[in-house]
Image (cartoon, rainbow, N blue to C red):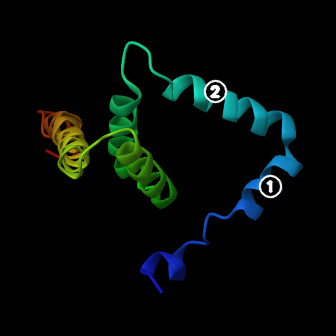
Amino acid sequence: MSHQDHVYSAATKEIAEQRRKLAPKQAEAFQAFSQAVFADGALSAKTKQLIAVAVAHVTQCPYCIRSHSKTALKQGATPEEIMEAIWVAAEMRAGGAYAHSALALDTIAQSHTPGSAAS
């Protein structure tokens, strides 16, 4: 049994059907939206799946990671391309934290100006 089986419920056809039964219009609209988003366009379907793999890692959705990795492979992505997409996601996540340090630095600077309570 994989670690996923201990933490997350399996994504089953029964769960998908329950979602459709509980909110059929929304489920249909979401499915149509997904099909439109992931269709070939200015970006290939393969490229879109690689983007989805990267985003899934940033959002840390195990269901999306598995689904989009599998679909990326079906669209012709190589394991190396998938791993590079994951590294892009990791850099962007780390880069965001680094870039936002400007907010902390600004706060520090403001709290250490003459006349501030922290000075």
Residue 11 horizontal/vertical position (percent): 62, 63
Camera-nearest residue between 101 and 23:
23
Q: Which residue type carries mark 2?
A: Phe
Please report the residue visible at 82 percent of the width from the left and 57 percent of the height from the top.
18
Read off the residue under disc 1: 17
Classify the position of the C terminus by image quarter: top left
Tell me: 113 left or right of 20: left
Say which residue label 2 marks.
Answer: 33
- Determine crowd level at label 1: few under 14, some 14-19, many 20+ residues with C-alpha closer than 10 A: few
Residue located 41% across and 55% down the image: 60
Residue at image point 77% right, 63% down: 14
Residue 61 locus on image (x, y percent)? 47, 55
| Quarter residue 93 falls in | top left
Q: Nearer the viewer, residue 85 or 76?
A: 76
What residue type is disc 1 on?
Answer: Glu
Q: Classify residue 92 by image quadrant.
A: top left
Give the side of residue 63 with respect to residue 89, left or right.
right
Q: Are marks 2 and 1 in contact (CB under 8 Å)?
A: no
Label 2 and label 1: CA atoms lie apart by 18 Å
Q: Indicate whether 67 appears above or below 36.
A: below
Q: Is residue 12 left or right of residue 28?
A: left
Please give left or right for residue 70 compared with residue 98 in the image: right
